[in-house]
């Protein structure tokens, strides 16, 4: 399955406890249709001291969230937008914002 949101894209959360927050995509899991967004869906986990982590304690980290709960932010118009796919002259795929008609992908 091909996902339309990629690593390093800016997204906005549409629903849940972090609704309205923006962040950068850190990692995408295409097989599970989930992604991790920086600063969103943060939880605290308690860890015991181990050989690698002698201190132990409370660790705060981001958990994966469903892909359908986020929408891409256009870098040109700054809105949460839908986008279409088109091809460049050299055959590479390009994502184009439907609001401002500007390409989302830069120089790829």
Image (cartoon, rainbow, N blue to C red):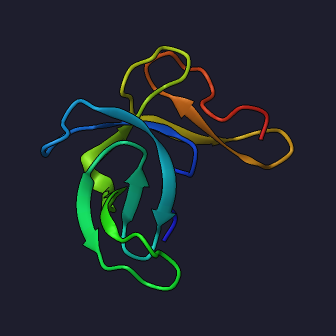
Does 69 sit left or right of 55 as displayed? left
Q: Residue furthest front?
A: 55
Q: Is residue 11 above or below residue 62?
A: above
Q: Is residue 100 above or below residue 104?
A: above
Quadrant into which the C terminus falls: top right
Residue drawn at x 48%, y 61% as measured from the top left: 28
Residue drawn at x 86%, y 44% as measured from the top left: 90
Along the line of sight, the residue nearer the viewer: 64 or 46: 46
Which of the 4 image quadrants contains residue 94? top right
Q: Where is residue 72? Give x, y as percent.
A: 42, 36
Along the line of sight, the residue nearer the viewer: 12 or 17: 17
Does 102 sit left or right of 89 as displayed? left
The reply to whether residue 4 is visible in this rendering is no
Which of the 4 image quadrants contains residue 62? bottom left
Along the line of sight, the residue nearer the viewer: 51 or 67: 51
Residue drawn at x 13%, y 46% as measured from the top left: 16
Residue drawn at x 41%, y 69% as measured from the top left: 55
Q: Is residue 91 above or below residue 72?
A: below
């Amino acid at each position: 399955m091909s996902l339309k949101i990629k690593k390093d894209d800016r997204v906005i959360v549409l629903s849940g406890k972090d609704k309205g927050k923006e962040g950068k995509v850190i990692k995408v899991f295409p097989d599970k249709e989930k992604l991790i967004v920086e600063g969103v869906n943060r939880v605290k986990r308690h860890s015991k001291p181990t050989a690698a982590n002698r201190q132990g304690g409370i660790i705060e980290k981001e958990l994966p969230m469903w892909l359908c709960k986020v929408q891409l932010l256009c870098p040109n118009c700054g809105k949460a937008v839908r986008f279409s796919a088109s091809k460049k002259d050299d055959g590479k795929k390009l994502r184009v914002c439907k609001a401002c008609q500007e390409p989302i992908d830069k120089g790829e």
